[in-house]
Amino acid sequence: MVHLQLLRHQPKLVGALVHLDPMGPQHFDGLWPMFADEEVRDATGALNAFTREQIRAGMARAGERHDRADWVIVHGSGAVLGEAVLMDLDEDNASMAYRISLVGPEVYGRGYGTESTRLVRDFALGPLQLHRLTLEVNSFNVAAIAVYRKAGFVLEGVRREAVRREGAWHDVHEMAIIASDPRP
């Protein structure tokens, strides 16, 4: 049984490099570059263009939602590095989807995404008691695919030529980890 109270009262998740704080409007300035920079959005293919007002409103609602968890990834120095999200709750099947986005190339390749993914994975399959955690990743995002594999996610399917980027078609990989899988 999924422990829904943990979505209503999101805990702070703490790692060696980063901590994940429940998202709120106070994080707007730190996260805005992730939404404002077209190159950052294009790097993952995950984020659409949003207005400042839409982002502020979404952050204000984050704490009111009880069917998902929105965290801000924060470095030990206090710098905002990105967001990590559990969404698409399927309570009957104890399943949710995961997404992560970092603020820009200056924070890529430093282990922040890997640690954040492991923190969320361990929370989701541990205290939250999900059976299954899924994600989608564009085939051109090779670094993210490597992070997900390191965290124990397994490729389950490919949606062939599902996204178009810079005039070329790319596949979308569907990956998942279930509670009984190894957690490297």
Image: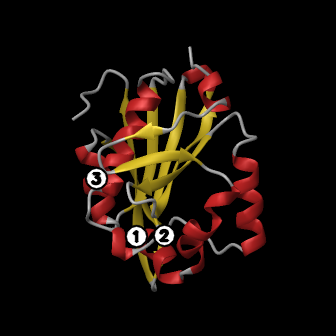
Is residue 104 depicted above or below 166 in this figure?
above
Q: CA distance from mark 2 to mark 3?
A: 16 Å
Give the residue pinned by disc 2: 45
- Dot 2: within a 10 Å radius of its alpha carbon, few (fewer than 14), some, or many (20 or more) residues? some
Location of the N terminus by quadrant is top right
**SS assignment at label 1:** strand
Q: Quadrant of residue 109?
A: bottom left
- Asked if residue 95 lies left or right of residue 155, the reply is right
Q: Callout 1, which amino acid? A: His
Is residue 36 depicted above or below 69 in this figure?
below
**Marks 1 and 2, the one that precedes in the sequence:** 2
- Residue at 61% from the left image edge and 50% from the top image edge: 23
Q: Callout 3, which amino acid? A: Val
Give the residue pinned by disc 1: 170
**Marks 3 and 1, the one that precedes in the sequence:** 3
**Marks 2 and 3, the one that precedes in the sequence:** 2
- Dot 1: within a 10 Å radius of its alpha carbon, few (fewer than 14), some, or many (20 or more) residues? some
Give the residue pinned by disc 3: 147
Nearer to us in this view, 20 or 7? 20
Contact, mark 1 vs mark 2 (Cβ under 8 Å)? yes
- Residue at 70% from the left image edge and 34% from the top image edge: 66
Q: Position of residue 77 (x, y in %)?
A: 39, 60
Q: Quadrant of residue 141?
A: bottom left
Q: CA distance from mark 3 to mark 1?
A: 19 Å
